[in-house]
Image (spheres, helix red, strand yellow):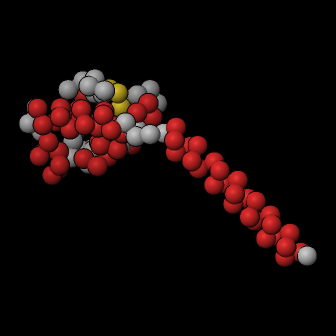
Amino acid sequence: MRRTLIASGATAALAAALAVVPAASASAAPDTSCMRAGIATLKSVGLFSAVAEGGLPIETAVFYGVEPREGTDVASLPDPLPLSVVLADHRAGQDSLFKYPWC
């Protein structure tokens, strides 16, 4: 009887956790249009290859109009920012560390 109650409780907890996952995922769709616009911007100013190889210096991003969002601790970020981080931040939408003028 005790094993049945434990198994039953574990199953209920797992079901509850799985019920929450789709709701959270559906509301947080990545902003791929912003990411594509960021890639296009890097290409248009001739920086895409350099950023792909060595990252994007934060100073360069700021020069092109990128602004840290309120609460972003820029000093704690790697500088230069790896391209993978830049693209992930573009996909983050309103949760991104930076505001991008092309998004």
Looking at the rendered structure, the number of numbered marks drawn on it comes to 0
Q: Position of residue 50 (x, y in %)?
A: 12, 45
Residue drawn at x 84%, y 76% as measured from the top left:
3
Residue drawn at x 76%, y 59% as measured from the top left:
12
Nearest to the observer: residue 44 or residue 16: 16
Q: Position of residue 64 (x, y in %)?
A: 20, 26
Vertical arrangement, residue 44 with respect to residue 25, above or below:
above
Q: Residue furthest right?
A: 1
Vertical arrangement, residue 5 with respect to residue 15, above or below:
below
Residue drawn at x 52%, y 45% as measured from the top left:
25
Q: For the N terminus, which image quadrant?
A: bottom right
Asked where in the image residue 6 lies, by quadrant, the reply is bottom right
The reply to whether residue 96 is in sight is no
Asked where in the image residue 7 lies, by quadrant, the reply is bottom right
Position of 19 with respect to 36 (left or right) is: right
Nearest to the observer: residue 79 or residue 65: 65
Nearest to the observer: residue 2 or residue 62: 2
Position of 56 with respect to 45 (left or right) is: right
Vertical arrangement, residue 14 with respect to residue 26, above or below:
below
Q: Position of residue 31 (x, y in %)?
A: 37, 36
Asked where in the image residue 77 lies, by quadrant, the reply is top left
The reply to whether residue 12 is in sight is yes
Q: For the C terminus, which image quadrant?
A: top left
Nearest to the observer: residue 52 or residue 71: 52
Position of 41 with respect to 84 (left or right) is: left
Residue drawn at x 25%, y 37% as measured from the top left:
36
Q: Position of residue 9 (x, y in %)?
A: 80, 64
